[in-house]
Amino acid sequence: MKTFPRFILQTEFLSKIPIPSTNYAFFISSNHKRRHCVAALSESTKSAEETLVVVGGGAAGIYGAIRAKTIAPLLNVVVIEKAKPLSKVKISGGGRCNVTNGHCSDTKILAGKYPRGNKELRGSFFNTHGPTDTMSWFSDRGVELKTEIDGRVFPVSDSSSTIIDCLISEAKNRGVVLQTGKTVTSVSTTSGGKFSVKVEKRTIDYVEHIGANYLIIASGSSEQGYKLATQLGHSIVKPVPSLFTFKIDDFQLVELSGVTFPKVRAKLKLETVQKSIPEHTQVGPMLVTHWGFSGPVILRLSAWGARELSDSEYKGSLIVDFVPDLHIEDVKSLLTLHKNKFAKQKITNSFPLEFGIVKRFWRYILEHEDAVEDLLWASISNNLLISIASRLKNCSFRVKGKSQFKDEFVTAGGVPLSEISLNTMQSRIQPRLFFAGEVLNVDGITGGFNFQNAWSGGYIAGTTIGNLAIAVNLKEEAL
């Protein structure tokens, strides 16, 4: 059988390429009842054959595909997604899609929001395409955005469908081909330095091979992307969960489910960590759930402590200061003043308003101090006041596990940043191989930072590929 020099996509893709019929071959062969499709073009049509295959139809993959096609309109761009495209975009932010964060114009501050990547991302990464660029991109395409008080950016519609529709429409208008229900199962390089991409659609026992000049792996935290990366010579930092809530070993917390603390200081202590880690102490809102604690302060702790928590099997201690703006001596003074002013009131019925807590939590504190329910403020000993003050400032909880945060899931780990160039998102190991998004060892805290990583990485990869494709076309025209 004749050996063809290149492979590209099948029927629907071939029909779009203006080439003479004598310059290509298309055939189907059968092997153990599996359908195999291969298509090839002659080297004489090289410039027309330039093809980018994107593995993964998430935020990074779609954004990168659009950018590449925008710069190089003649480049054939194909996105292969095994499930529904932009599925993570759909569920993010409670279905509203937290597009990015609008309160981080300083790239160093922005980079500091990434537990993995905070040092590496301080360079040109966000300068090339940052949150303001992302917001402008969507605004220029008719998407109205709003920035909430905490910096999170959402579409005015409060619907992730607005973002999805914008991306899919732009991809379609640019001529990006989106194939769903297919999985890239392996990738190899040819003697000519191209990629041979094996694609399977298991539901109909179908296999096809696609030839690609460029490859973007943007498959998120799936095993698929890690497998492909290792096939092409890359290593993988062991993936572990990030952005999760804490299960707490305290049955009395169930009674506080739904209680929110506007501001606490929480410190994570793990037996496997001997040194002091500043990021293991966080300040912010915290929510009591029926299984433990959630809220921004807990999610940040889970992100910064992701790997250490995994090593500790998600067991440790959480030390919470429920009145972080008050010194312990101030807390004691307020309790003493309250005792003198409300001496005849029951201790369970009143407490200093300066603490900013709810009555349910106050009673929880008293129960842990074994305070008698009918005890009057006048009867409280100084030792009990000191003990209450200490518990408010230094309340210890035992972490016994983790729970997933809503329907969102972020992973720490992936392809090491040392193995790619962040200026281009190109592999340092395999030319014309690119990575973007969560497949890399980059993850951010909650607040729109993980999507910004996807937009920035996809944009840079798409820009690099588009420029390379243009350079090839110009060279071919000159010859």
Image (cartoon, rainbow, N blue to C red):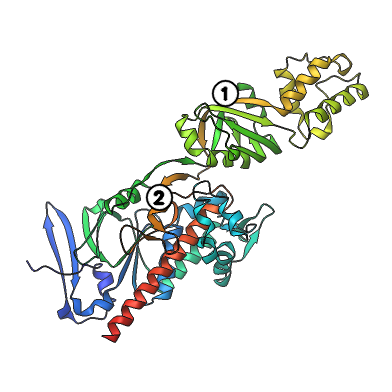
Give the quadrant of residue 103.
bottom right
The residue sitting at 19% across, 82% down in the picture is: 20
Whether 135 is drawn above or below 348: the answer is below
What secondary structure is marked by label 1? loop
Near-viewer residue (128 or 133): 128
Q: Is residue 186 visible?
A: yes
Extreme residue in the bottom direction: 478
What secondary structure is marked by label 2? loop
Question: Is 41 placed left or right of 442 in the picture?
Answer: left
Near-viewer residue (437 or 404): 437
> Residue 383, position in %: x, y?
80, 15
Q: Are marks 2 and 1 in contact (CB under 8 Å)?
A: no
- Packing grade of label 2 (10 A; few <14, some 14-19, many >=20) is some
- Packing grade of label 1 (10 A; few <14, some 14-19, many >=20) is some
Question: Is 228 placed left or right of 302 in the picture?
Answer: left
Question: Is 59 placed left or right of 369 in the picture?
Answer: left
On the rendered image, what quadrant is the N terminus found in? bottom left
The residue wearing badge 1 is 249
Q: Amino acid at mark 1?
A: Asp
The residue wearing badge 2 is 416
Which is nearer the N-term, disc 2 or disc 1? 1
Extreme residue in the front direction: 275
The image shows a total of numbered marks equal to 2
On the rendered image, what quadrant is the C terminus found in? bottom left
> Residue 190, position in %: x, y?
20, 63
